[in-house]
Amino acid sequence: MVKAANKHRREVHFNVGDSVFLKLRPHRQSTLKQAVHSKLAARCFGPFTISKKVGSVAYKLQLPKHVRIHPVFHVSQLKRVIGQHQVAPALPKELEVDEELIEPEDVLQHRISTINGNSISQLLIKWKGKPIEEATWMAYFEVVNQFPSFSLASRRFFKGHLYGQKNAWNGLRMLYS
């Protein structure tokens, strides 16, 4: 039984300074922008240099600074580079950190929209550093969840009533205290 279990396993060791390709986990790769044919999508990215061995089966890679994935990977996600010159795709743009982080500056309006029979409170958000023409509607709960430091309690339409709810001001006081 052990022989059958070990049939598809491989004993792999890398040294610090070795070049390896990185295989993204299938669920991580599926969350990235889909190619027209997933069969033609890149299977490995790199090559990257191993900077440190972490534990017995994990390695830390030297990834570009603009990438927002953790640099430590299990040995099963790495594949040794063979030869000198390898052409491989760069990491996808979706894993890069955006240079400009968009934050809300002000709430211009509010409305209640009915989506699939449910009433949803929406806010018209003006973004920092963007013209007023680029203001977008966002659901109230999305604003609260994505931007917890953005205080809605001081906004002009929260004085007394919030979307027809008389006790909304008290609810906001509890939410932000």
Image (tube, rainbow, N blue to C red):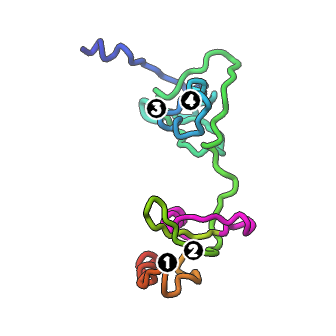
Q: Earlier in the sequence, mark 4 or mark 2?
A: 4
Query: Are the residues flagged by discs 2 and 1 in contact, CB closer than 8 Å?
Result: yes
Which structural element holds mark 3?
strand
Query: Are the residues flagged by discs 3 and 4 in contact, CB closer than 8 Å?
Result: no
Q: Nearer the viewer, mark 3 or mark 4?
A: 4
Mark 1 crowd level (few <14, some 14–19, many ≥20, 10 Å Cα): some
Task: Decide if residue 114 is on the left or right side of residue 82.
Answer: left
134 and 12: which one is in front?
134
109 and 177: which one is in front?
109
Q: CA distance from mark 1 to mark 4?
A: 50 Å
Magenta part of the chain = 126-150
Task: Decide if residue 16 is on the left or right side of residue 132.
Answer: left
**Where residue 31 sits in the image (x, y, percent)?**
53, 40
133 and 126: which one is in front?
133
Residue holding disc 1: 163
**In this picture, is 97 found above or below 163?**
above
Residue holding disc 2: 110
Q: Earlier in the sequence, mark 1 or mark 4?
A: 4
Q: Earlier in the sequence, mark 2 or mark 1?
A: 2
Residue holding disc 3: 74
Q: Earlier in the sequence, mark 3 or mark 1?
A: 3
Q: Earlier in the sequence, mark 3 or mark 4?
A: 4
Residue holding disc 4: 22
Instruction: Please give the name of the residue rendered at 30% of the width and 13% of the height, measured from the top-left corner.
Output: 4
